[in-house]
Amino acid sequence: MSAPGDLPPARRVDKPWGHEEIWAETELYVGKILRIRQGCRLSLQHHAVKDETLRVAQGRLQLSLEDAAGHLTVRELGPGDTARIRPLRRHRILAITDVEVYEVSTPQVDDVVRHADDYGRS
């Protein structure tokens, strides 16, 4: 039974690369679990306002992340590794294995500008 102030139940959002489970959504923050299938990658994107932090729970991924000079750098992340993605920085995740990632961000879930996408999304 829910008490006043409880969050709504988690919701699953299917994606072409796997799915995300939104487990917390308030006016101040959002918590998600991203489940990305091996070999799949998210779009090369940036956010105008959204600020997010990732933590790999299971598996391995490659994170391409734009640095302050505007260059995309690639690093491999595994369980326990974290990364902050600041607004306006281009980024992309490639799942080396099936991967589970925790994401905590500001609440602008639709703030996505895609630069390239394997699935034809604009």
Image (spheres, rainbow, N blue to C red):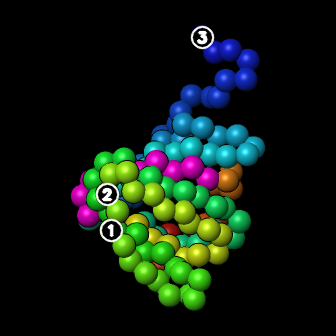
Residue at x 54%, y 41% (from the top left corner): 22
Amino acid type at image mark 3: Met
Residue 39 appears left or right of 44: left
Residue hosting label 2:
78
Compared to 65, does 55 lie above or below? above
Q: Quadrant of the N terminus?
A: top right
Q: Is residue 37 above or below residue 28?
A: below
Q: Amino acid at mark 1?
A: Glu
On the image, the x and y values in percent for residue 50 come to 66, 61
Quadrant of the image occupied by residue 75: bottom left
Q: Are marks 1 and 2 in contact (CB under 8 Å)?
A: yes
Whether residues under marks 3 and 2 lie with C-beta atoms below 8 angstroms apart, the answer is no
Observer-nearest residue: 8 or 6? Answer: 6
> In this view of the protein, can residue 14 be seen by the observer?
no
Tell me the number on the disc at residue 27.
Answer: none
At label 3, counting other C-alpha atoms closer than 10 Å, the crowd grade (few under 14, some 14-19, many 20 or more) is: few
In the foreground, 64 or 117: 64
Identify the residue position indicated by label 3 in the image.
1
Residue 92 image point, x, y percent: 45, 71
Mark 3 and mark 1 lie on one chain; the one further toward the N terminus is: 3
Looking at the image, residue 13 lies above or below residue 89: above
Q: What segment carries the magenta color? A: 94-105
Identify the residue position indicated by label 1 in the image: 76
Question: Residue at position x 59%, y 75% from top?
Answer: 89
Helix, strand or loop status at disc 2:
loop
Q: Is residue 100 magenta?
A: yes
